[in-house]
Image (cartoon, rainbow, N blue to C red):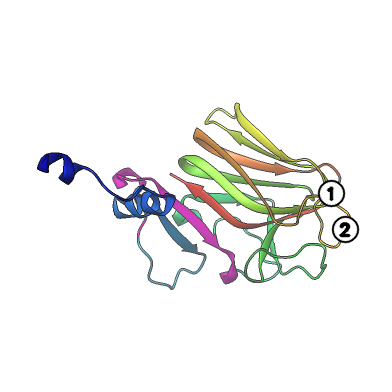
Amino acid sequence: MVEQATLQSNKLPTIEDAKFALDNFNIENEIKASARRGQVEPVLDATRLTVPTCICLDLEDLKCFEAVERQYERWGVIFHNSLAIQPSNPAFPTYSGLIVLMGAPKSGFLEASFLRPVNSVSAFVTSSQRLVLSAYDRDRQLLAQTALPGSNLANSDSPISPNTLLSINVNNIYSVTFCTFDGQFTLDNFRFCL
C-alpha cells in the first residue's frame, strides 16, 4: 500500500506542468540574432547542436531602407530581394519594434536561403494580396506551401488581422520564398529552427 501511495499524485498534470518540464530539458532553445557585428553573441555551430534551436532575427539593428542580404549570414541565413523599412503606411503595422522586411526592389517577392537545412520557418506577415510561403529542398524541389488567403491590411474590411503568423514545418528546408502577385507585403519576427 505504501508503494502505491508514493506512485500516485493527487494533482492532475496541466499544460503549464508540461511546459515547465520541457523547459527543464532544453527541448528548444531560442537565440535572438542581431545584425550588428560589434555585439558579443554566442557562436552558432549547427554541427554541435544537440537540441532543436530556433533563431529569431532582431530587425531593430537594421537601418531604414537598408538592403538586407548577408547581415544574418553568421546565423545561417542569406536574404535576396529584401529591404528593411520602418513602415510609414498605417496599413502595414509592425508586429514588434519599428523595422520590418519588405520584398524590394522587385515588389511582391522575398527569398531566404539557409546555409544548413532547417526544419521550421515562420514570420508575421501583412500583405495587400494573397501571399504564398513556399519551402524548397537543396535541389529547389518544392517541399511545402502555405498561404495567407487574401489581404490583411490594417484598417481594412479584411477578416484576417494584420501580422498573421505564416509557418512551414518540414525537414531539410534550404530556402523559402514569400510571393504575392501584384502586391506588397511586410515580414516581422522572421524565425527558423534547426
Specify the farthest residue to the left.
2
**Mark 2 and mark 1: span between their CA atoms?**
15 Å
From this viewpoint, is residue 28 visible? no
For disc 2, the neighbor class at 10 Å (few under 14, some 14 to 19, many from 20) is few
Which segment did they paint magenta? Answer: 43-61
The label on residue 156 is 2
The label on residue 183 is 1
* Label 2 vs label 1, nearer the camera: 2
Secondary structure under badge 2?
loop
Residue drawn at point x = 32 percent, y = 51 percent: 11
The residue type indicated by label 2 comes to Ser
* Relative to 140, residue 191 above or below: below
In the displayed structure image, the side of residue 7 where residue 55 appears, left or right: right
Secondary structure under badge 1?
loop
Report the number of numbered marks. 2
In the displayed structure image, the side of residue 83 where residue 59 appears, left or right: left
Whether residues under marks 2 and 1 lie with C-beta atoms below 8 angstroms apart, the answer is no
Confirm whether the magenta stretch covers residue 50: yes
The residue type indicated by label 1 comes to Gly
In the displayed structure image, the side of residue 9 where residue 96 appears, left or right: right
The label on residue 168 is none
Q: Position of residue 91 (x, y in %)?
A: 82, 63
Near-viewer residue (83 or 14):
14
Q: Position of residue 151 (x, y in %)?
A: 82, 49
